Amino acid sequence: MLLTNNIQSVSDSLVSGTKAAQKRKAVLRRLALLAGVCAVCFLTAHLIMLAALRLPYEDTRLKTDLGGMLVAALLPVLVLMGFAGRRHLWGITLCLLACGAAALTALLPR
Amino acid sequence: MRDTLRVHMGWLHSWLGFLAGLLLLCIFASGTLAVFDTEITHWMQPEVPLHTRTALTPAALNAAAQAVEASERQGFSTFLSLPSHRDPVLRVLHYDGYEFTGPALSPETGTSFAPRETAGGQFFYNFHFSLRGGDHPGVQLVTFLGLCLLVTLGSGLVIHLKALWPDLVLLRPFGPRPRAWVDAHLIAGVLFLPFILFMAYTGTAIHARVLLPAQSFFSPSPAGPPKKSAPKGRLLQAGPPLPPLAPLITQGRERLHSPDGNLVLFTADDVRIFRSDASGPFLTRDHADFSRKDGHFLRSVTRSSPTVATMQLVRGLHYARYAPLTLRWLYFLSGLAATALAGSGLVVFLMKRRRSSGENAFFRLAEALTLTVITGFPIATLGLFWANRCLPVALTGRIMAEIDLFFTLWTLFAIHALLLCLRRHAAAAWRQHLYCLALAGGMLPLVDLLSGSHPWGDGAMLFVTVDALAFLSGLIALFAAQHLRRPAT
């Protein structure tokens, strides 16, 4: 009886230990995904600001203001999509595509 | 448990919302107060009579010009704020690094009202967009928090998209405590979602260039010769004596179709008369320029291309300087709802984790921080109002004394919260803070009356309103403290 109880408690603690480990692993995976998505999104935002400098206006402040409006709208949406799309990592792929498009717009000669 | 989209987004919403929410609550609260920044400055400067509503006379403008020249000789870049319906005095202002300060003159005679020096409503305005931290890191941090807020709102929408309508109508304030707090969080979030989303977006867009400067991180532009420019609010050299201002202002107002509340800026060569911010929802910077030497008209700068107009509208709607009183109250109430949303979100976060965390050290730290912002910030705010009435009127460096007192109070209450929470007396800390808030709010009208600065004629309504709102906040705090004495169901 005592042996059965001991085995039961050991197995319970093992199960709860596994659950905790699984939970920790899930949180770490989420954190890594969020960090990756944020890094790509901030790079995209920076490239958008650089691309905004190419707008055909004389006033630099107006260009950066317009870039800022775009960034404020796009960055949160990109972060959410990047974080939400986990199946086949389509979210972060989308972020990388946006980043690539922004890089081409900002860096290629006109 | 399956890691569904809702669970995934819920995790992001909870953690990002909590971490950003701690400061966002203070930003919401100070922004809400900043809607009435001019009125708060009036309350804090009772020496300035509010019945003055006369046309601007040449004598007053001459006195103002002399004050501007004197201020410029001290190296300040000084400007005039002409009387308006909202602020019926002539102000000679300069930027002190945080706020615009300076004497208030009678628009009729030009005599100075000699108001007490005070941080005024400008303090809350500055705190709202920079946490008094300047462009770096203050504005950068607030803009970053704005982005976090947008992500949090988006994730909140994803979580509650299915139940938006029930969330809108379901409020159970007398239900079990966690249920009541979640309902309050949802109802504030759903009902005021358009306002909060709009303000978060416009606020972030306005200052996004400070967070992400349009300068390559990878190949910084080669540094040119250092540009000779004065620090913000200072002058490199004073200009020649000013021409008579009255004819210039009449002409400028006609050209700009802006009859009152204009700003008049002075450079070494020009006198620039700006269109009033209250003229409409477009926050334009249209101005008419005159020569500083002889006062002849130089140019009129008006920009109204669709792109410029879009930015002007974004700024105008966020700053709400155009808003009449009724709309201003709507902004104020919506701001209160946003503050309640952040506050209830913080409380819900703690409630959900109180048992599961076993009240470990991190949880206790989180609770202390929550206490610091939910009760500590309003206590410090009311402390600023008390300081305005209790500090000697002629005290030198009065502005900084008020502000120092605000931050000292806030720090003291943060330490108090930390000490009690870490010793597992969080409930006592909540109650004690709420009683202090009740005392500070409830007694403010009495202090205002006893200070003898309360006018009973024109403008009394403003004083009564501020006192009544402080008293109401005290009553709410008292109710909450009494409610906390009862055991949770």
Image (cartoon, helix red, strand yellow):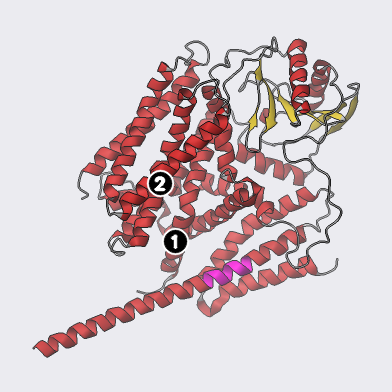
Horizontal side, residue B434 vs residue A52: left or right = left
Residue B30, placed above or below residue B186: above
- Which of the chains bears the disc numbered 1? B
Residue type (three-letter) at the residue carrying disc 1? Trp
**Badge 2 and badge 1 in a common chain:** yes
- Per the image, label 1 sits on a secondary structure element best described as helix
Indicate the quadrant containing the N terminus of chain B: top left, top right, bottom left or bottom right: bottom left
Which is more toward the observer, B37 or B78?
A: B78
Name the residue located 70 percent from the left edge and 72 percent from the top edge: A100
For marks 2 and 1, give the one nearer the viewer.
Answer: 2
Q: Mark 2: which amino acid? A: Ala
Magenta span of residues = A33-41
Vertical side of B361 occupied by B203: above or below: above
10 Å crowding of disc 1: few (<14), some (14-19), many (20+): some
Q: Is residue A20 visible?
A: yes
**Residue A38 counted in the magenta span:** yes
Residue under the point 42% across and 63% down: B10
- Residue B47: percent from left, percent from top: 56, 16
Residue drawn at (62%, 48%) of the image: B139
Q: CA distance from mark 2 to mark 1?
A: 21 Å
Q: Main SS type for the magenta part?
A: helix
Q: Position of residue B477 (x, y in %)?
A: 33, 36
Answer whether labels 2 and 1 touch (C-beta < 8 Å). no
Does residue A98 lie above or below B236 as drawn? below
Side of B10 relative to A8 (left or right): right
Find residue B119 and report its horizontal and vertical position in percent: 56, 31
Chain of the residue displaying label 2: B
Mark 1 or mark 2, which is nearer the start of the sequence?
A: 1
The residue where tag 1 is placed is B15
Residue tagged by mark 2? B414
Kindly give the residue lying farthest to the front in the view shown.
Answer: B396
Residue B427 left/right relative to B463: left
